[in-house]
């Protein structure tokens, strides 16, 4: 399955014969679809790539609240405000589940936050784009959460127990996120010409960055081969991207929006859509920190962390006192 992935990484994936007995027993558990739990033996590489992926996933959830939070006070109706509030709160919860899952691998929350704030850790490129109109909130729910669902559903079967269980909980909430976004886009398309134009403008700006959420092309994916051998990842980046395009194209047509890709067309032989070339230069520029909102997003996160220091200090002082009282009893 992953043989077609980047050759260097596929070479790095050891065969059973090349493994020492402990690694071989571990891989046999993975191949047998057993869940790996925090106290189980695991290769250091397995632990490290899980910390990398789970923490970056958590960072994405937390940073992902910023573009949408920008519209909570400007939602067009009380109902839309309540829905958006609920969604943004859900994302905070998703981030906390995932930080907790990462901490089971022996890394502290403070270390993970420091990696985010120092730029050592990534978060999803998609959250470095601005939300310019209310239609962007629809496009984010429909496309960004739609892409996240496509990518997260397989992660429910991840070999690492805490990550798999966190994903099962998160996926239940994601479907509401996607539906409310699509509902916003549908209502705009059923509205005035100006409202439909706003929805089309949002689709034009969010379509290609949403395809980038699935990661670089398989040939450039440095982690896929090993992550699939360890059943962290069940599908390649391109497979999930294709599924997303095939699912979303008819949804756009149904509400009368045009996907901004002249090369998008159904290919009967392939049983899927052909689509245009993604601008990977833009992707890598955003990953390097040169996206439209990278600096703004990090400033907001660092400020929130610093503003919240007094709460953390108060809680830990209380916890220390409570622990001392219990110890003295
Ligand atoms: N944004 C930022 N970095 C990205 C990226 C993206 N869209 N796609 C890939 N990368 C990074 C990878 O992290 C890796 O860098 P690293 O070695 O420094 O970690 C590098 O690019 C090479 O990519 P690979 O394909 O080799 O890396 P992975 O095998 O990790 O695949 C992934 C990338 C598909 C994003 C995978 O990490 C994954 O499935 N992560 C979990 C899901 C996730 O994080 N989704 C992000 C959105 S969460 C969200 O949208 C919340 C929703 O509720 C709104």
Image: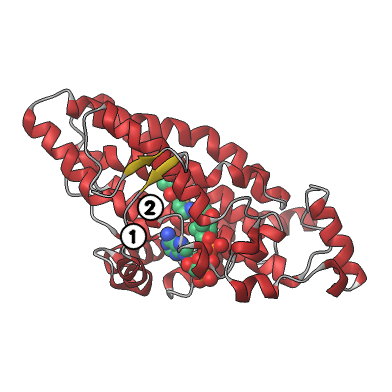
Q: Nearer the viewer, residue 16 or 214?
A: 16
Quarter-of-image position of residue 283: bottom left
Indicate whether 74 appears above or below 32: above
Mark 1 neighbour class, 10 Å CA radius: few under 14, some 14 to 19, many 20 or more: some
Left or right of 277? Residue 241 is right
Q: Residue at x 45, y 64 (%)?
A: 216
Of the residues tagged 1 and 2, which is closer to the observer? Answer: 1
- The span from disc 1 to disc 2 (Cα, nearest Å) is 8 Å
Q: Earlier in the sequence, mark 1 or mark 2?
A: 2
Quarter-of-image position of residue 156: top right
Q: Nearer the viewer, residue 314 or 149?
A: 149
Q: Residue 33: x percent and y percent?
A: 79, 47
Q: Residue 204: x percent and y percent?
A: 21, 47
Q: Is mark 2 within 8 Å of ligand 1?
A: no
> What secondary structure is marked by label 2?
helix
User: Can residue 113 be seen at all in this image of the molecule?
Assistant: no
Q: Residue 69: x percent and y percent?
A: 30, 46
Left or right of 234? Residue 25 is right
Q: Residue at x 59, y 37 (%)?
A: 169
> What secondary structure is marked by label 1?
loop
Quarter-of-image position of residue 328: bottom right
Q: How many marks?
A: 2
Q: Residue at x 42, y 55 (%)?
A: 213
Residue ID for mark 2: 211
Q: Residue 256: x percent and y percent?
A: 21, 29
Numbered tag placed on residue 278 in the rendering: 1
Left or right of 172? Residue 131 is left
Is the C-beta separation of discs 1 and 2 under 8 Å? yes
User: Can residue 147 be seen at all in this image of the molecule?
Assistant: yes
């Amino acid at each position: 399955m992953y043989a077609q992935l980047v050759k260097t990484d596929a070479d790095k994936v050891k065969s059973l014969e090349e493994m020492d007995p402990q690694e071989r027993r571990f891989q046999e558990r993975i191949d047998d679809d057993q869940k790996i739990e925090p106290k189980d033996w695991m290769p250091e590489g397995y632990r490290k790539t899980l910390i990398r992926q789970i923490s970056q996933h958590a960072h994405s959830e937390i940073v992902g609240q910023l573009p949408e939070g920008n519209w909570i006070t400007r939602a067009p109706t009380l109902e839309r405000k309540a829905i958006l509030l609920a969604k943004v709160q859900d994302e905070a919860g998703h981030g906390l589940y995932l930080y907790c899952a990462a901490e089971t691998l022996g890394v502290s929350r403070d270390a993970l936050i420091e990696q985010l704030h120092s730029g050592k850790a990534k978060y999803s490129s998609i959250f470095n784009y601005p939300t310019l109109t209310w239609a962007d909130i629809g496009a984010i729910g429909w496309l960004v959460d739609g892409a996240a669902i496509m990518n997260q559903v397989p992660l429910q079967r991840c070999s690492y127990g805490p990550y798999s269980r966190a994903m099962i909980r998160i996926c239940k909430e994601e479907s509401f996120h996607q539906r409310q976004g699509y509902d916003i886009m549908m209502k705009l398309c059923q509205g005035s010409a100006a409202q439909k134009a706003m929805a089309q403008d949002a689709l034009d700006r969010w379509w290609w960055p949403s395809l980038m959420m699935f990661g670089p092309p398989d040939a450039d994916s440095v982690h896929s081969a090993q992550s699939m051998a360890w059943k962290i990842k069940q599908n390649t980046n391109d497979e999930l991207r294709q599924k997303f395009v095939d699912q979303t194209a008819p949804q756009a047509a149904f509400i009368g929006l045009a996907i901004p890709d002249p090369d998008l067309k159904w290919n009967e032989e392939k049983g899927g859509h052909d689509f245009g070339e993604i601008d990977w230069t833009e992707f890598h520029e955003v990953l390097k920190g040169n996206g439209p909102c990278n600096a703004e997003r990090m400033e907001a996160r660092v400020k929130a962390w610093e503003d919240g220091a007094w709460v953390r200090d108060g809680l830990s002082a209380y916890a220390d006192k409570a622990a001392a009282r219990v110890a003295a009893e």
